[in-house]
Amino acid sequence: MQAAEAKLQRVLEGSKQFLVPHYQRPYSWQPEQWEALWRDILVLLEEENPQPHFLGSIVTSPAKSVPEGVEKRLLIDGQQRLTTLLILFALLRDQARLGGLDKLASQIEDLYLTNRYESGNDYFKLLPTQGEDPSLSDRENFMRIVRGEGPNVKTGIGLAYQFFQNKLRKADAPGLEAVHRIVISKLTLVSIILDEQDNPHRIFESLNGKGRPLSQADLIRNYFFMRIDAHEHEKTYVELWRPMQKRLGDEVVTPFVRHYLMREGPIVRETDVYSALKVRVDEDRSMGPLDHLRRLDKFSQYYTLLLRPQHEPNTNLRDRLVRLNRLEVTVAYPFMLNVYGDYARGTLSEADVIDLLDTLESFLVRRFVCAVPTHGLNKIFTPLYAQASAEPKFVEAVRKILAGKGYPRDEDFRDRLESARLYGAGDRREKTKLLLERLEASFWHKEHVVTAGLTIEHVMPQSLTNEWQAELGPTWEEDHEQLLHTLGNLTLTGYNAELDNDRFSDKKKLYAESHLELNKYFAAVEHWTAAEIDKRAETLAERALAVWPYYGPVHVPAGATDKSPVTGTIPQTVQVRGRNYPVRAWVEVAAVTMDAIANLGDEEFERVATELPKFVSRDATSFRKSSRLKTLSNGAYMEINLSAAAFHRFCVQATQLAGLGPDEWRVRYAPRAVAEAGEAG
């Protein structure tokens, strides 16, 4: 490696060409960097005896594998500053021609911008990268400027030319010859020329800690192209890298590579994608860098279908992938990439893939409804493919493994689906809409019902009128707070604005005109009360068990509830995170549950108090006048004048808000007669 400080004139003189490799990112300097360079030039111009000003380094290596011609050097580092200086030279030449300074114009063109006696691409001192759109690529626009055809100001190179042009047009702008003299003789660079035995990639990494930081995707691109012979760059860029980058989009390259690496098991942090890829490729002696890039390109095609399933030609797969995307299933992408790879190779059939996608949907929907925490999904899905592949029947193995990873049983799914607050902000709203759409589709219409333009309708509205309060009865406040966002009170409609908070009798008229089976249910209902909401929830929950079936073993753990209603039952134990608490009344169940949530932390408790203020609050005056209150262990108050069903629903919703799934909170209860007989025995 040769390293020496050199003036810009020495770097550029002679018949040579600097090639910007395809692995380099496009020209990306902005006004901030241009302004800094111009400010440095002005400072030097103002000094009587200006000292050389150091701009930074450029690193080049011989490009021996490209066709012979002028001396060609790969510009490993420093392309941004060198490109900017040559843009400035082109501008000085153009302004010199306009001002009649022909000698200066010819000097700049012949010595610093072009190889005068060469033709074709060899004519240009610098050859930037090509872009997908030639009209916007760095190479084409740099050539335009060098040829004197003017800048395209829709590009970074064109904007840089325009920036310096505006500076030179000012009334107090320095003279062209003075600027030329300072730039060519006082701006210095450290020119590092690598030998064949030097590792350009390692040097590139060490030099790129300054300036505009490179993204993980930049580093990945650089790594591959630095490991591939230069004569393969153009073909590799055009046939592999550019199509992959276009297919995914710039922002998706890094997440894709992360999920691609995680296909083989280990979890890769977002900040470690580049280093993990480098280790993987360096250690794999069975394939070269180009082979790895080809495989990466192939899997990027599968990844694109996961991201944008509308491009999947198979309707059965497309519909399922769309639903999984709405469930935000990116954590399962490493597993699904492997599945798609096997499907493409023919080792998995279409029926197998459909079964797997249905299994994932059931797994994710049930966990969402039951509020099973999502933070452990990475550890579930990343090793899933390898674990299932070790078994003779892959699909069955996947189901067996997932069944042991917090997969809610029918009893828990039904219980939470009937009582939990499904509707909410952000992704909860979208997921709840998906649930309703799938329930609607389960009626198997002969004519497809398009639900894309429909919205979620609260039958009992979010704002209650006097008529609605009378409809609900004396416990309207508690019923409204508990039941508003539950499954039994939600449907789909295209008439949300018209329905608003109209009386139920008026809403029924619009429901009667609906083509949705979900809304035909209301035809036989006279009044919309808590009892009717519960009844509809039970009906839809039963249907949901068939839409999202349970794939695990039929095993009822100790302390599990059955599907019988809680009215007329006596609770026996409450289990919170593996600890059992004996209880004899539903008010004790609620008190134990809230004390356990308080022990989780203030954030969890306050979330419950904020969402269910009619049932638990730190302010005793916030309850209705007829309330009977119990003081909890943290000093807050809880309503105790409730039915068994209301207590049960309150506990389900409280644990849901606190992030406790069915395996972390469970109540065991029995019909009163059975419980009393057990005590007598």
Image (spheres, helix red, strand yellow):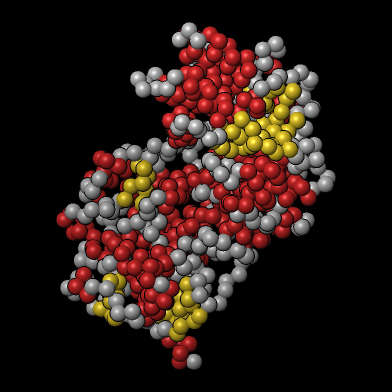
Which residue in the rendered view is the most extreme toward the bottom?
A: 681
Which residue occupies 47% across, 14% down? Answer: 95
Identify whether 585 is placed above or below 414.
below
Q: Quadrant of residue 207?
A: top right
Which residue occupies 61% across, 20% down? Answer: 112
Q: Position of residue 314 (x, y in %)?
A: 62, 35
Could you tell me if residue 8 is visible in this image?
yes
Q: Position of residue 403 (x, y in %)?
A: 62, 62
Count of labels in the image: 0
> Which of 674 and 537 lies nearest the eye of the viewer?
537
Q: Is residue 45 left or right of residue 75?
A: left
> Which of 447 and 588 lies nearest the eye of the viewer?
588
> Which of 203 and 597 lies nearest the eye of the viewer?
203
Which residue occupies 63% across, 49% down? Answer: 273
Q: Position of residue 395 (x, y in %)?
A: 69, 53
Which residue in the rendered view is the most extreme toward the right?
A: 286
Q: Is residue 240 left or right of residue 216?
A: right
Identify whether 646 is placed above or below 265.
below
Could you tell me if residue 293 is visible in this image?
no
Q: Quadrant of residue 589?
A: bottom left
Q: Is residue 345 left or right of residue 241?
A: right
Which residue occupies 53% across, 77% down? Answer: 578
Identify whether 451 is placed above or below 460.
above
Q: Is residue 184 left or right of residue 481?
A: right
Q: Quadrant of the N terminus?
A: top right
Q: Position of residue 316 (x, y in %)?
A: 60, 39
